[in-house]
Structures are given as structure tokens and as C-alpha cells.
Amino acid sequence: MVQSMPPTFSGILEALFGQIGSSNQQGDILGSILQFVFILMFAITMLYGQRIQAFIMLRNIDASLRRLKVLRDNARRALIDTIRSFGDSGRDPTPEVDRLLEYFWIQPTNLDPYGIVAKIEHFMNLHDERLRAEVGALAPKADRAQVVNLENLAEVGLALNTIYRIVRHFYIFGKKTMSIFIIYQLEAQLPQIIQEAEAYASGMQAFQLGQPIGDGAGSLLAAKFMYGAEKRLIAKDTLASEVSFEGRRLIVLKAEGPGANVGKIGEALTRVLEENMGRISLVIMVDAGMKLEGEETGGVSEGIGAAIGGIGVDRFKIEETATKFGVPVYAIIIKESLQDVIAPMKREIYAGVEEAVNRVRRLIRERTREGESVVLVGVGNTIGIGQ
Amino acid sequence: MEERGRTVGLGSLMTFIALALILLFFSIFLIYRSMVSYSQGDLTISFSYLIFSLMGLILSSYFLMHLKNVRLITAKRVPSVFTMVECLQCGFKNIRPFQKGDYVLKRAEGCPKCYQSMLITSIYAESEQKPKAP
């Protein structure tokens, strides 16, 4: 029978559901199958929708986990090969490297926060010293700078291994429990985790070959100012140099290169301020900083405060001493992405350092008078940067 | 930073593409059935086929669009690193590939012009071309 009326909503429903259980004179087999499939899909979605969603998310997490495993394995292989090149011939460092990659340190409890900075510093120093000693023992032919580079390479491997193990833990836990909340939280954080892991991985080449990295922007600036002047060791792995700039006394602080040192900037600056009994007109700190999406790499910004990263020990010391002596602390940041920080230094960052040098000169001219003393601190990992 | 996307193995990728294509062809078949039903005067059946075919087209286009964010697990490209050496006497500059042992402010090879020792002034990696932000 020909239907001349236009399709209505009730007519559609009749077409979708009305044929079931009745003789199928007007519809065809395909129509019945489609109706059945539609009802089946509806029922499955109602009963198992969450499990299907969890399954899809687990597949996505599995793909990311495989990427993390590739990054971890590459770092492990790079560490083994580099240690082997500096180690005793015939000795396989693989078991020791696997042991290093499982290293951990337990942060002091903050139940009673008073004095916690000193405790954190103590255990951090212990961790660094032990890791350096272990790496040094595996690579007896490496010189001091190369041992420090190896230590940083081991830190990269450690970080990647830890990220992989934690993501794998939550993946397996989510798979066992099929809890949508655990799986959803993990999937939501995965883009950031992958970005962080790839940033670590991009630093491997630099640490293997001793190339400057993006984080060394501050150290590079300081090196430009202190080149040719006499240097002295003011703190562990940290150098100080005194130069003259347009009638001002400029004390420049920097980690000792060209090894992958970050130095003890907090301790060094504290010592300088105390040696000069606070008679410092200005402290300028230059460091690499995180850029926001849409910003250009190598852009320079100025501000106030202790421009130094890390867990907070150095920043605490600088802030405490600057406050005690009433010394202004200015910050200059050279902007980079998370991947640029550990990757080999880009040309744009060099341009940013040149711009930052001009900003430092301008600040000294504008904020200080002739005869005054200024401290310039170049913060960052000084791998591949001498002085 | 550009979207990195998800990584999959080759087998999963082929399965993904096959499912998307099967759904696409089935949707096109349903459009045909819809036209046949319409020509026979059965408007309601025709419209229901059209709805199913649209659902299928949307789903298959979603899968196929999703593919552009999927890539195979590949090795990361290693950036090329260069060393710039300068002669502070005559101003001669040279850019060469990085050699192990190079570091900024290291005394390098002699200047080909004035034979003075040159200085390494920068070591940098060439960055990839990225699309400009609007």
C-alpha cells in the first residue's frame, strides 16, 4: 500500500519498532535486521556503556604506555652504552645500571615543618653524592665533567623508568578493577605525562655528548660576563668572578662548567651577601622559564623574586638572606617550552640570551650608581658551557 | 606545542582502517536502500534507512578523522647540532657540525685567516619548522 503522507515522528517509531512481532508484509528482511541491531545497541549501551568506555580508554592508555616503554628502553640502552665506553673493557654494566634505574629517595616528613628545608637539603645532597659515586665507580675512565654528565644521564633514565612504572601500575590497577574513575583520571593526565617523558628523552643526546641544553640559558649569560676574569670556587660546583661594568663592581655567580652541574646557587649567593655584609645594591637572577602555548621560544620577561627552580632549598636560602639584608632581587626569564629545557639548546634561545644580556645592562645602568656592587646570578645546568 | 597524538602498532591501525571503510560502504548501501524505498513510495522506511545511513556516515567519518591523530611508533628524530667558532682578532666566523668535546668558550682550532686561536661562541640545535600561531 503506497503511503502518500510525509514521514512523521510517530511514523518513524512505528517503522522502527512496529514491525516486531507482526507479519512483515511491507518491510523487508534488512529493515527487520536493522531494527533488531538498533534495539540490541540500545540495550548494550544501557547495560554495558561504562565498561565499553573503560575499554576504549584502556586501549588509549595502552598505546601511550608502549610509547613510554620505548622511551625508557632507549634511555636505559643509552646509559649502558655510555657507561661501557668509559668503563673497564669486558665488564657488563647492565645489572648495575638496572639497579641504578630503581633508585629512590624518601622525602623527609613534613608533620613538623620547622627545619624541614635543612632536612631536605641533607637528604638531597646524600642522594646526589651516592648517585655520583655509583656512576663514578662504573666509569673509571671518565673525567670529572664526564662523570657529572653520566650522573645526569642516569637521572634521565631514572625519571623515565619511574614514570613508566607508575603509569603501568595505574593501568593494570584500572584494568583489574575496571573502575571508570581511576581509568579516567589516568587518561586525563596522560598528555601531560607523555610531554614530560618526551622532554626527558630529548635530553639524552645532550647528556651523552656534552651539548648545551635549554636550561643552561642563565649559565650562558653569566659565562659571557665572566669570560676572561679570575674565578674562585665559592660553593660546591659553583664559581664566582668579579668584573667591572661601567663603574660598578659586578660579582657573577655560575655553576662550574662544562660538566652538567647546577651548583649550589643558594649557598653561593648567601656567602657573597654575608661576605659583603649586605652592601649589595642589587641581585639579578637569570634563568630559563616555562613559556605558555602561543608564546615564542627565546622571549624574555622581567620580574621580581628568586628565579631558581628545584625543590625549593636554594630559593628558600636566597629569599631568607635577601630579606635579612634588604637586598632587592630582580629576575629575568628566558622563555622555553618543557621540551626545550632539556633538549640541545636552540638558536632562538641563544637570541634570547643576547636580549637578556641587554636587559641586564639596562637594569644595572638604571637601578644602580657608579661605585655600587651588583650580583649577577646565572641559574641553570651548565653542561657544554665553560667560563 | 603541536599535538603528538596516540601511537599504535601496524596491525591495530589496519584493523581500524578496515572497520571504518566497512562502515562507510554499509552507510552508502543504506542510502541506496533509502532511495529505493522512496521510489517505491514507502517514505517512512526510506527515512529510517536515511537516519541509519547518516549515523553510519558520522561514525565512519569520526573514525577516519581520528586516524590523522594516530601514528605508528617510530624513532624520534635526532636534532642536528652545530658549533660556531669565531676569531676574536679578525672577526672570522665558521659554523661546523658539533664534535664531542666542544663546549661554549672553549679555545678551538686556529683561524685560517690570521692563524690565532678561535673561540667557540655558541653550540645550538637546528629547530624544526613549526606552523605559526594565529
Image (cartoon, coloured by chain):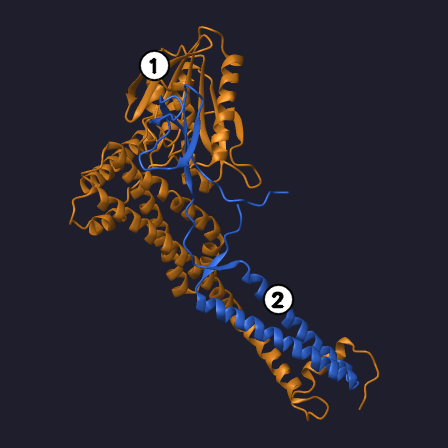
Chain letter for mark 1: A
Identify the residue position indicated by label 1 in the image: A274
Which residue carries the number 2 mark? B61
**Label 2 Cα crowd, 10 Å radius (few <14 / some 14-19 / many 20+):** some
Q: Nearer the viewer, mark 2 or mark 1?
A: 2
Taking the view exactly as shown, the residue that stands out farthest to the front is B113
Residue that appears at 37% across and 55% down: A70
Q: Amino acid at mark 2?
A: Ser
- Disc 1 element: helix
- Compared across the picture, whether A259 is left or right of A39 comes to left
Q: Amino acid at mark 1?
A: Glu
Would residue A306 appear left or right of B46 to someone viewing this image? left
Check if mark 2's residue and mark 1's residue have beta carbons within 8 Å.
Answer: no
The numbered disc on residue B63 is none
**Mark 2 chain:** B
Q: Secondary structure at mark 2?
A: helix
Left or right: A52 with respect to A99? right
The residue that appears at 83% across and 81% down in the rendered structure is A5
| Chain (orange) | A
At label 1, counting other C-alpha atoms closer than 10 Å, the crowd grade (few under 14, some 14-19, many 20 or more) is some
Q: Say which chain is blue.
A: B
Rendered view: A281 above or below A213: above
Q: Based on the displayed image, in which of its 4 quarters is residue A27 positioned?
A: bottom right
Q: Quadrant of the C terminus of chain A?
A: top left
Q: Is residue A307 visible?
A: no
Q: In front: A366, or A80?
A: A80
Vertical side of A56 occupied by A363: above or below: above
- Residue A290 point in image, percent of width and height: 49, 36
